[in-house]
Amino acid sequence: MKSKRKSVLISSNSLANKFIFSRWGIRPSQRRRYRNLFTSVRKHCRVLFQHYLLRGRVQWTEGNEQRIFGVYKFDEIRGNLIVGFVLIAPGSEWTLPSRHQK
């Protein structure tokens, strides 16, 4: 039996919101007041996600361990790019996960 891999979905807008809150303490409910800031950071987050999609994977070394994540596009809604990240074992081949089968 094949083990099922779990993926984590992250949207570019939620990443931007978390970054803005952690850096400047500005909440998404204040978006109207800081429209230019939110627009700019959201645009940069979309570009970052598109870069990861083109690469198809993200990897880094942490101590003696190598962490590798496969990256795939889950959805895009009005410019909000939703990307899935799947943890993969070093040396294994990674393919896009199948959608829920009915």
Image: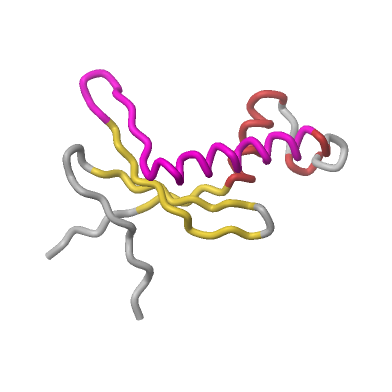
Is 61 above or below relative to 39?
above
Q: Position of residue 30 (x, y in %)?
A: 81, 39
Q: Residue furthest top?
A: 63
Q: Is residue 47 magenta?
A: yes
Task: Write down the quadrant of residue 39 in the picture.
Answer: top right
> Is residue 77 toward the left or the right of residue 83 in the image?
right
> Is residue 97 toward the left or the right of residue 89 in the image?
right
Is 102 above or below relative to 64?
below
Between 25 and 73, the one nearer to me in the picture: 73
What residue appears at the point 28 percent right and 55 percent down from the top-left corner? 95
Q: Position of residue 79 (x, y in %)?
A: 66, 53
Task: Write down the quadrant of residue 62 in the picture.
Answer: top left
What segment carries the magenta color? 37-66
> Is residue 13 toward the left or the right of residue 68 in the image?
right
Q: Is residue 82 magenta?
A: no
Task: Write down the quadrant of residue 20 in the picture.
Answer: top right
Between 47 and 68, the one nearer to me in the picture: 47
Between 91 and 66, the one nearer to me in the picture: 91
Q: How is the image coloured?
A: secondary structure
Q: Main secondary structure of the magenta part?
A: helix
What residue appears at the point 22 percent right and 26 percent down from the top-left corner? 65
Q: Residue furthest front?
A: 54
Q: Position of residue 13 (x, y in %)?
A: 64, 45
What residue appears at the point 46 percent right and 40 percent down from the top-left corner? 52
Q: Residue furthest left?
A: 1
Q: Residue furthest right?
A: 33
For the C terminus, give its image quadrant: bottom left
For the N terminus, give its image quadrant: bottom left
Q: Position of residue 42 (x, y in %)?
A: 67, 40
What residue appears at the point 83 percent right and 39 percent down from the top-left corner? 35
